[in-house]
Image (cartoon, rainbow, N blue to C red):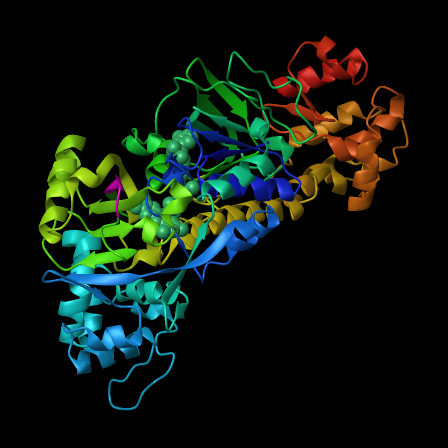
């Protein structure tokens, strides 16, 4: 059983893909609901994300996933109209004539801006097409320097600077040109006559989340369950090897409890997770105690409202923010994260006819995003829904510290200042969500700091990362990026499983000395005690066929099916070649059951005679 930490889109996608590869996976989600940053509010019609969400045309993996899960037809591509509020006027900026009519950029600035978005470098007079293909080349270039050089001062000051200010506040000068160029590519397709084409699920992104939950299986997801520790043993073994299963540290669960299937580990199925701890995202990193561990992941500790359990696991995918990664493993990710305060304002009437309104004024929010100018209000029982959002760079900021009531007052007043016709009486509901970590600050040199998917070298074998600090979430974090990150981890786990070294004993001759040396060379699983254990199990006087043979993968499968021959003399050799993996502390994994070698002899009576059990006990004690 693999463990997935986090029930956001990345965690669910990880579990789904692992299952597709034939592995078992269990998702633990700290909060009561799955979805993470894509969690939902109810409305008079369809549910709505607490934070605004849409898809860009360039995001293909999530659309393919939706199709695979049978909800592809729910993705609708709509026009999301953009505008810029400057000096009391809303300027639409979608169609060519709207851009030409925009009064706050000169014709020259518009030309330079146009060339930049088409990725044409016109410096020096000879246009260079596809000039910004290699984003990495701009990783260390400050975005301001880049824009002054590759566009114009007007483009920077009149167009980009207010947007950068709204998104990154006083961190804007730290941002890399690579991020901006990546964002321009990321935006995807535009309809030249209508505007930007954006995707949204009829019924919200909850449709995709629900389809994922159905595919993964409710019984494989536990909400209200926070992973609080990952135990990494000091020894190494091939990733994905059942050798990673050892005894549980929990009084509740023991290593030889029945497993749900042959994949090892166990689950807390269908647990009622009410009253469990709230979002871990909101907690500070706990004390780092385990940095730079090496070894193999062994177990996870999961806290629910009523108990704490330690579960054996074959591997862990951490699909959440890097502060949680750090608290669980000691891996320090230097990426800074921004927070957000975001309100969904429910209104009787529309405020503008724009979906996304950027604002070039000194206002206490970054943008107004009128969702029902993108998805028709009839899907929400006629309600008009608008997001008001602001990123937070520091928890000392006034907005972060303000009460919900104060935020409401501040924002409604500011909207009224911008739009004198705004009727506050039209506001029927004002719901606020806050999260201290919603997006990375894409500083210069960002790519060097992303967390690798496979943390085998940095943390321990079997530890993977699919959270927002992963490569897939660059140049912009997104749901698609979460799916890609989850898939990347699951594919790596499966690859490691497929290509794991053959069990050491598969290479053994019957000479104990030769076996020992071969084992040491061929596999980290191999230890002298392994062959001693094996020798102690094999009939010493028999002419063993399997002892000198190396089973092919096909014969592995065949022998695996012969599951009950262990107690009948030499036949158990066949089982031995397939089913037994041994590591310290000595544990046998056989037919999905595991046995500790240092248990009482009676434990092994179903394997072979007490003589063998006795020898096992002796081996484990050595
Ligand atoms: C304001 C805003 C606007 C956005 N706009 C868009 C958009 O337009 N389009 C788009 O595609 N994306 C958008 N996103 C980004 C998108 O929401 C995220 O990229 C995506 O949801 C990240 O998913 P995730 O699974 O990686 O992380 P999360 O959604 O953060 O999920 C992680 C989960 O892990 C859980 N967790 C944490 N610690 C533990 C623990 N110890 N044990 C168990 N569980 C734990 C958390 O409770 C959480 O549910 C936006 C996000 C925000 C905030």
Horizontal side of residue 582 vs 10, given as left or right: right
The answer to if 345 sits in the magenta stretch is: yes
Q: Nearer the viewer, residue 313 or 176?
A: 176
Q: Nearer the viewer, residue 58 or 20?
A: 58
Q: Tell me residue 284's x, y (percent).
A: 27, 32
> Residue 396, can we see it?
no
* Residue in view at x 25 percent, y 90 percent: 125
Q: Which picture quadrant has residue 121?
A: bottom left
| Quadrant in the picture for the C terminus | top right
Q: Identify the magenta region.
A: 340-349
The answer to if 124 sits in the magenta stretch is: no
Q: Nearer the viewer, residue 443 or 162?
A: 162
* Residue in view at x 34 percent, y 76 percent: 119
Horizontal side of residue 580 vs 371, given as left or right: right
* Residue in view at x 62 percent, y 29 percent: 583
Q: Which picture quadrant has residue 265?
A: top right
> Residue 190, can we see it?
yes
Q: Tell me residue 349's x, y (percent).
A: 26, 46
Q: How many marks?
A: 0
Q: Which picture quadrant has residue 240?
A: top right
Q: Is residue 109 above or below residue 614?
A: below
Q: Tell me residue 358's x, y (percent).
A: 21, 58
Can you tell me which quadrant of the image ligand 1 is in?
Answer: top left
Q: Tell me residue 478's x, y (percent).
A: 39, 51
* Residue in view at x 63 percent, y 23 percent: 586
Q: Nearer the viewer, residue 200 or 55?
A: 200
Main secondary-structure element of the magenta-colored stretch: strand
């Amino acid at each position: 059983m693999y463990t997935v930490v986090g029930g956001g889109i990345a965690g669910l996608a990880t579990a789904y893909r692992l299952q597709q590869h034939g592995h078992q996976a269990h998702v633990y989600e700290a909060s009561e609901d799955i979805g993470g940053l894509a969690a939902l509010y109810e409305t008079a019609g369809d549910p709505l994300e607490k934070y605004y969400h849409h898809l860009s045309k360039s995001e293909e993996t999530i659309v393919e996933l939706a199709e695979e899960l049978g909800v592809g037809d729910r993705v609708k591509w709509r026009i999301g109209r953009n505008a810029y509020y400057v000096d009391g006027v809303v300027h639409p900026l979608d169609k060519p004539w709207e851009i030409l009519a925009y009064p706050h950029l000169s014709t020259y600035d518009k030309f330079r801006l146009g060339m930049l978005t088409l990725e044409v470098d016109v410096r020096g007079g000879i246009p260079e097409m596809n000039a910004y293909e290699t984003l990495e080349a701009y990783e260390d270039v400050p975005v301001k320097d880049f824009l002054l050089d590759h566009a114009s001062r007007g483009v920077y000051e009149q167009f980009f600077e207010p947007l950068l200010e709204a998104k990154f506040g006083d961190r804007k000068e730290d941002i890399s040109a690579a991020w901006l160029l990546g964002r321009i590519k990321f935006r995807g397709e535009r309809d030249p006559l209508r505007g930007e084409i954006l995707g949204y699920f009829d019924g919200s992104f909850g449709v995709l989340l629900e389809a994922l939950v159905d595919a993964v299986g409710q019984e494989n997801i536990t909400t209200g369950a926070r992973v609080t520790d990952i135990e990494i043993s000091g020894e190494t073994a091939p990733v994905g090897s059942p050798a990673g299963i050892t005894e549980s540290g929990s009084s509740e669960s023991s290593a030889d409890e029945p497993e749900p299937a042959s994949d090892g580990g166990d689950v807390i199925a269908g647990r009622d997770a009410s009253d469990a701890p709230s979002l871990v995202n909101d907690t500070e990193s706990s004390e780092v105690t385990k940095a730079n561990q090496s070894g193999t992941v062994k177990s996870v500790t999961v806290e629910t409202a009523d108990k704490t359990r330690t579960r054996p696991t074959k591997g862990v995918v951490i699909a959440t923010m890097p502060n949680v990664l750090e608290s669980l493993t000691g891996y320090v990710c230097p990426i800074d994260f921004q927070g957000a305060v975001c309100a969904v304002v429910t209104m009787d009437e529309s405020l503008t006819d724009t979906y996304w309104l950027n604002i070039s004024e000194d206002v206490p929010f970054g943008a107004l995003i009128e969702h029902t100018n993108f998805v028709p209000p009839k899907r929400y029982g006629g309600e008009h829904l608008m997001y008001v959002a602001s990123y937070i760079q520091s928890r000392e900021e006034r907005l972060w510290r303000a009460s919900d009531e104060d935020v409401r007052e501040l924002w409604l007043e500011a909207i009224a200042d911008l739009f004198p016709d705004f009727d506050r009486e039209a506001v029927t509901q004002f719901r606020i969500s806050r999260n201290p970590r919603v997006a990375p600050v894409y500083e210069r040199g960002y790519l060097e700091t992303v967390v690798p998917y496979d943390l085998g070298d940095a943390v321990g074998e079997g530890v993977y990362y699919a959270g927002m600090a992963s490569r897939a979430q660059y140049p912009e974090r997104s749901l698609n990026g979460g799916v890609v990150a989850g898939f990347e981890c699951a594919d790596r786990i499966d690859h490691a499983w497929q290509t794991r070294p053959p069990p050491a004993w598969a290479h053994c001759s019957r000479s104990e000395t030769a076996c020992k040396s071969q084992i040491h060379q061929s596999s980290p699983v191999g230890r002298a005690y392994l062959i001693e254990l094996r020798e102690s199990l094999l009939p010493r006087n028999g002419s063993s066929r399997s002892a000198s043979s190396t089973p092919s993968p096909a014969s592995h499968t065949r022998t695996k099916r012969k599951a009950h021959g262990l107690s009948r003399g030499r036949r158990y050799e066949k089982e031995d070649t397939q089913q037994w993996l041994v590591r310290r502390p000595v544990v046998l994994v056989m037919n999905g059951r595991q046995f500790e070698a240092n248990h009482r002899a009676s434990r092994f009576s179903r394997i072979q005679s007490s003589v063998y059990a006795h020898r096992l006990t002796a081996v484990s004690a050595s």
